[in-house]
Image (tube, rainbow, N blue to C red):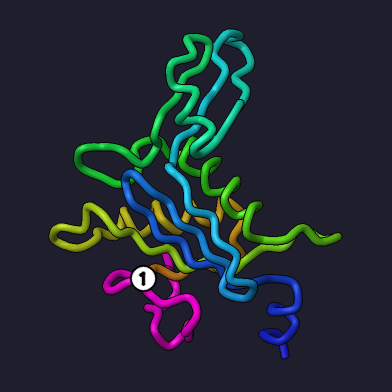
Amino acid sequence: MFNKLKTLFSSTIYIQLREERITITNIDTQSVYDQRPYIAIDVSNPKQKVIRAVGADAYNLRLDKSLEVTNPFSHPRLLIADFKRAEKVLMQGLREVNPSKIIAPRPIVIIHPMDKLEGGLTDIESKVYRELALGAGAIEVYLHVGEALEPSKFSMDQVCTPIIC
């Protein structure tokens, strides 16, 4: 019964993370957010940093000297370079694909790192992905490593077990 109630107030979101691309798909509605994972932060006031743009809009502002435009998913060793900024990029993507309701929906998230998987994932990396999705608004997080899932033919049987840390 609890699972039926949970599906009334949440949706299932599939996130594919790459260094130069983030794709977020709402499995229930098939809406897609597919952007470069950039974030533009106004650094003109050092006491208050304000996010000005995310995604392609932020990428297009990279020449503006009053903005700090970065890709929080670009690091030589790991897929996550800046946790807080990566969380903000994911939040924006979740807002785009998760329609607003009276109560803010907290989705079930399947997070799928697509880059920098040589040798597999460590427990620490799994925890980073879990915390990233929870911080972006997820109610439950699953980690998928392997072939890309097909959102139109999606089944939870294709996904690994929940991330438990």
* Residue numbers of the magenta segment: 144-165
Q: Where, by quadrant of the figure, is residue 160 drawn?
A: bottom left
Q: Give the percent coordinates (x, y) of residue 61.
A: 49, 23
The main secondary structure of the magenta stretch is loop
Up/down of 72 relative to 106, above or below: above
Report if residue 84 is visible in the image. Answer: no
Q: Residue at x 59, y 61 (%)?
A: 138
Q: Give the percent coordinates (x, y) of residue 67.
A: 51, 16
Element assignment for label 1 = loop
Left or right: 112, with 49 as reference point: left
Report if residue 79 is visible in the image. Answer: yes
Q: Where, by quadrant of the figure, is residue 148 drawn?
A: bottom left
Q: What residue is pinned by disc 1?
A: 144
Q: Give the percent coordinates (x, y) of residue 5.
A: 75, 82
Up/down of 75 relative to 27, above or below: above
User: Does 159 lie within the magenta span?
Assistant: yes
User: Does 55 lie within the magenta span?
Assistant: no
Up/down of 43 relative to 87, above or below: above
Three-letter code for the amino acid on which mark 1 is drawn: His
Q: Where, by quadrant of the figure, is residue 165 drawn?
A: bottom left
Q: Residue at x 53, y 65 (%)?
A: 25
